[in-house]
Image: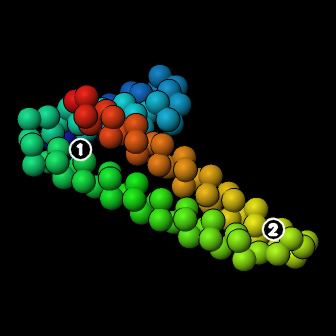
């Protein structure tokens, strides 16, 4: 595991030197992780289960946020809070998309 971690740290350093964006870098890191567990059905199954669980958790959070928004009135006092919750919803949706991409990478790998 230590050698594997050192290897991934070295790869990540090289990707950063190339100037890759954080999104591309994260995707490449995940591809490297998947290639390291290739052939280990238990690890792959566990990773799929983890990703699906994270997606479900985020969907529940979004549902709760949307429910909370319905309780806000349409006055100036609640506008900052509404914007904060909408930002949290957008962030959660973005995370869901990233997790779905990881799941697709895992299914292809």
Q: Is residue 44 left or right of residue 54?
A: left
Tell me: residue 83, above or below residue 8: below
Task: Indicate the position of residue 98 as horizontal and vertical percent values.
Answer: 45, 42
Question: 68 or 95: nearer the eye?
Answer: 68
Question: 40 or 21: nearer the eye?
Answer: 40
Front: mark 2 or 1 = 2
> Under tag 2, what secondary structure?
helix
| Colour option used | rainbow
Q: Is residue 22 left or right of residue 105?
A: right
Task: Indicate the position of residue 18 as horizontal and vertical percent values.
Answer: 47, 22
> Can you see residue 1?
no
How packed is label 1: few (under 14 Cα within 10 Å), some, or many (20 or more)? Answer: few
Say which residue appears at 62% left-offset and 60% top-offset: 88
Task: Indicate the position of residue 66 as horizontal and vertical percent values.
Answer: 63, 65
How packed is label 2: few (under 14 Cα within 10 Å), some, or many (20 or more)? Answer: few
Question: 8 or 75: nearer the eye?
Answer: 75
- Whether pointer 2 and pointer 1 mark residues with C-beta atoms closer than 8 Å, the reply is no
State the residue position of label 1.
Answer: 5
Mark sitting on residue 80: 2
Say which residue appears at 9% left-offset and 43% top-offset: 41
Quarter containing the C terminus: top left
Mark sitting on residue 85: none
Which one is earlier in the sequence, the residue at label 2 or at label 1? 1
């Amino acid at each position: 595991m230590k050698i594997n971690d050192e290897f991934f740290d070295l790869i990540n350093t090289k990707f950063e030197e190339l100037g890759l964006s954080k999104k591309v870098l994260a995707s490449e890191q995940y591809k490297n992780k998947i290639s390291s567990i290739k052939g280990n059905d238990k690890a792959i199954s566990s990773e799929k289960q983890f990703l699906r669980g994270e997606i479900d958790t985020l969907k529940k959070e979004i549902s709760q946020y949307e429910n909370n928004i319905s309780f806000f009135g349409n006055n100036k006092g609640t506008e900052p809070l509404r914007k904060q919750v909408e930002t949290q919803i957008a962030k959660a949706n973005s995370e869901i998309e990233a997790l779905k991409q990881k799941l697709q990478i895992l299914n292809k790998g």
